[in-house]
């Protein structure tokens, strides 16, 4: 392809992807850097909805949802390959999640992140940030 032509980015709404491609993408985010293949495979198996972005067969964007399909959905792991950022891919992934046919009855989408510049443009509000977290220590997890 001539270098002046932008590659065509395609999107898919399925979670049946090679977890190795996702682990490669995870390396770019500080909060996901250490994630390993076996855990990513297991995570995908139990994830309810995933949206992926592709340049040919290269995974360049990802986002996923855990939900009861009625009251609540949480959005996790929205990530775009650095080489493809600032082209609208991240916003497209989130829009595809919010408009996903299987999620059309969900009352409230929840996010655990601090990136108002990105998410507020997509209609998210930080007014309801009243969450708490409990983190399992690495040691307990291994036992
Ligand atoms: C955050 C992230 C997913 C955004 O993806 P992207 O494809 O670069 O974003 P888009 O091009 O769709 O940007 C949409 C809008 O959000 C803004 N935006 C994007 N990233 C931003 C950031 N980090 N801070 C503030 N605004 C941001 C853009 O300027 C753009 O605004 P515009 O519509 O007025 O031009 C991407 O930067 C990323 O993968 N970051 C590392 C992983 C991460 O931290 N993910 C968030 C945790 S869930």
Image (cartoon, rainbow, N blue to C red):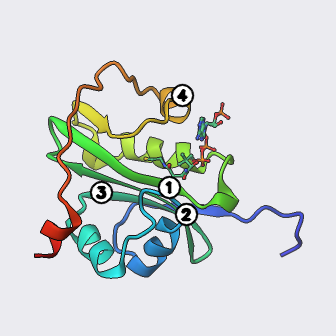
Q: Which residue is the site of mark 4?
A: 121
Q: Which residue is mark 1?
A: 79
Please identify the quadrant where the N terminus is shown: bottom right
Decide if ligand 1 comes within 8 Å of the CB at mark 2: yes
The answer as to whether callout 4 falls within 8 Å of ligand 1 is: yes
Front residue (pair 99, 132)? 132
Q: Earlier in the sequence, mark 4 or mark 2?
A: 2
Where disc 1 sits, the SS reads strand
| Residue farthest along the top direction in this orientation | 127
Q: Which residue is mark 3?
A: 49
Q: Nearer the viewer, residue 78 or 129?
A: 129
Residue 128: x and y, percent?
Answer: 28, 22
Residues at badges 2 and 1 in contact (C-beta under 8 Å)? yes
Task: Determine if residue 105 is in view.
Answer: yes
Q: Is residue 21 above or below residue 116?
A: below
Q: Which residue is mark 2?
A: 28
- How many C-alpha atoms fall within 10 Å of the one at disc 4: few (<14), some, or many (≥20)? few
First in sequence, mark 1 or 3: give its number: 3
Tally of marks: 4
Q: CA distance from mark 3 to mark 4?
A: 22 Å
Q: CA distance from mark 2 to mark 1?
A: 8 Å
SS for dot 2: loop
Q: Mark 3 or mark 2, which is nearer to you?
A: 2
Drawn side of residue 85 relative to residue 21, left or right: right
Of the image marks 3 and 4, the number of the one nearer the N terminus: 3
Who's the residue at 35% across and 59% down the image?
A: 50
Q: Determine the CA span between mark 4 and mark 1.
A: 16 Å
Answer with the quarter of the image where residue 56 lies.
bottom right
- Residue, x 20% and y 66% (percent of image)? 46
């Amino acid at each position: 392809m001539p270098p002046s032509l932008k590659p065509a980015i395609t999107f898919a709404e399925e979670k049946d992807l090679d977890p190795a491609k996702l682990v490669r993408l995870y390396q770019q985010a500080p909060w996901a850097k250490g994630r390993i293949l076996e855990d990513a495979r297991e995570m995908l198996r139990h994830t309810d909805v995933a949206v992926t972005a592709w340049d040919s067969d290269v995974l360049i964007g990802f986002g996923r949802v855990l939900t009861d399909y009625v009251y609540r959905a949480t959005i996790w792991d929205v990530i775009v390959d650095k080489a493809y950022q600032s082209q609208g891919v991240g916003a497209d992934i989130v829009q595809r999640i919010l408009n996903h046919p299987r999620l059309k009855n969900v009352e409230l989408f929840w996010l655990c992140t601090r990136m108002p510049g990105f998410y507020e443009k997509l209609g998210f509000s930080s007014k309801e940030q009243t969450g708490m977290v409990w983190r399992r220590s690495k040691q307990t997890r291994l036992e």
